[in-house]
Image: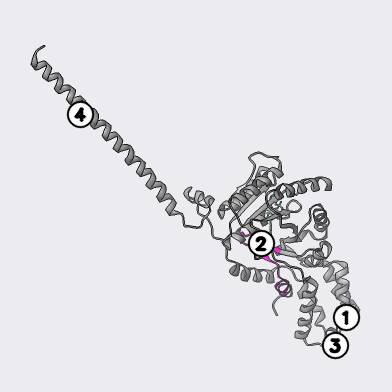
Amino acid sequence: MDTNVIIALICLAVVLVVAGLWWFVASKRKHSAEQSAVTAEVAAAHSEVPAGQSQEAQAEASLGQSVETPESSASRMTRLRAKLAKSPNPFGKALFAILSKDQLSESDWEEVEDTLLRADVGAEASEQLVSELRSDARVTGEKDPQAVRTMLREKLIALVETGQDRSLAASRPGSAKPSVVIMVGVNGTGKTTTAGKLARFFVADGKKVVMGAADTFRAAAADQLETWGSKVGVPVIRSDHEGADPASVAFEASERAKESQADLLIVDTAGRLQNKANLMDELGKIRRVIEKNLPVDEVLLVLDATTGQNGMIQAKVFAEAIGITGIVLTKLDGSAKGGIVVSVQRELGVPVKLVGLGEGPDDLAPFNPQSFVDGILGDE
Ligand SMILES: Nc1nc2c(ncn2[C@@H]2O[C@H](COP(=O)(O)OP(=O)(O)O)[C@@H](O)[C@H]2O)c(=O)[nH]1
Ligand SMILES: [Mg+2]
């Protein structure tokens, strides 16, 4: 073979080897550059989310949805107190108008009792209050309206105040973590809405909340709860098919709350059960499965104030089916029957802990007897 050909072949081989080496090194460099770009992107995505937010909130934020900040407790209380004073709950005002008359006739006293009954105070409590008022010298003798008003205020507060603890277990110092609240009550009373409002309430206080959609009758019920949760970055554990076992959703929610070290788990339930045995069976099962993971320290019965005594009969069935620790009285904003606070506490033996005062997301307030009575008595 010609020496020139050999030299040309050697040169070609050298060029090929050098080109191959160059290609290998370049592709390696490109790969590592891509990787570091991805790492930088991930880091940037994380740094955009403020510290202290939940994983779900981060996921939400990265999806471009903003997480709302619920109203603070102080602002909520001022706003809702004013709202209660303006609510169509005139029985305090009506009583005051009658009692400030110069001479109280027998028919005036009948009117006092009627007013109380119409406001759903209940027969026993109404009778008791009338007899106390009749024997009070400040009503029968004194005619200074201010004195009558003060006396009426005291009597009404005494009627509403039971001396029981109205705080939620989750708000007490040293409460279990996660604390568990189960919402129960008849369909349409406001369970899901109250669960959503309650979640916001705790989120506003910087607490980590998880919700469980154990109303599995309709997918829409879980969607409704999810809508509430997603606005404030609260994860909602749900089933993806209608008619799933509510207890298994509740169990999963309790596992999630425990794993994620949440402060509070709120479990929404269905209210449409054919009979008491059925109801006891289902609510009992929900409670038992949660208790495999966490103690249940609050069962809130949700009662619609506008349904009056009828609603209370149904509420009693729930109270018997699962021990309740407190009552949420909803739709007090649209009810002239504020006296139901008195009768429900008497009938069920547990305190009203929260009141719903509207459809707004933060229209839920802790129940306070003084503010309530001031509200129904109206401004001077
Ligand atoms: N005005 C008013 N409406 C309320 C209140 N609470 C709930 N609602 C309304 O009552 C309806 C039924 O509520 P929902 O939570 O779905 O009841 P659930 O079937 O018990 O879960 C909804 O339209 C709510 O907006 C309240 O405090 N005031
Ligand atoms: Mg519901």
Of label 1 and label 2, which has the lower sequence position? 1
Q: CA distance from mark 1 to mark 3?
A: 10 Å
Start-end of magenta stretch: 354-375
The residue under the point 67% across, 44% down is 249
Does dot 4 land on a helix, a strand or a loop?
helix
Q: CA distance from mark 2 to mark 3?
A: 50 Å
Q: Say which of marks 1 and 2 sits in front.
A: 2
Q: Which residue is mark 4?
A: 18
Circle 1: residue type: Arg
Q: Nearer the viewer, residue 180 or 6?
A: 6
Is residue 111 among the parts visible in the rendering?
A: no
Label 2, residues with CA under 10 Å away: few <14, some 14-19, many ≥20? few
Q: Say which of marks 2 and 3 sits in front.
A: 2
Does dot 1 land on a helix, a strand or a loop?
helix
Q: Say which of marks 4 and 3 sits in front.
A: 4
Left or right: 12 in relation to 105:
left
Q: Which residue is mark 3?
A: 141
- Which disc, if any, is residue 134? 1
Q: Is residue 314 magenta?
A: no
Q: CA distance from mark 4 to mark 3?
A: 115 Å
Left or right: 293 in relation to 96:
left
The residue under the point 43% across, 50% down is 45
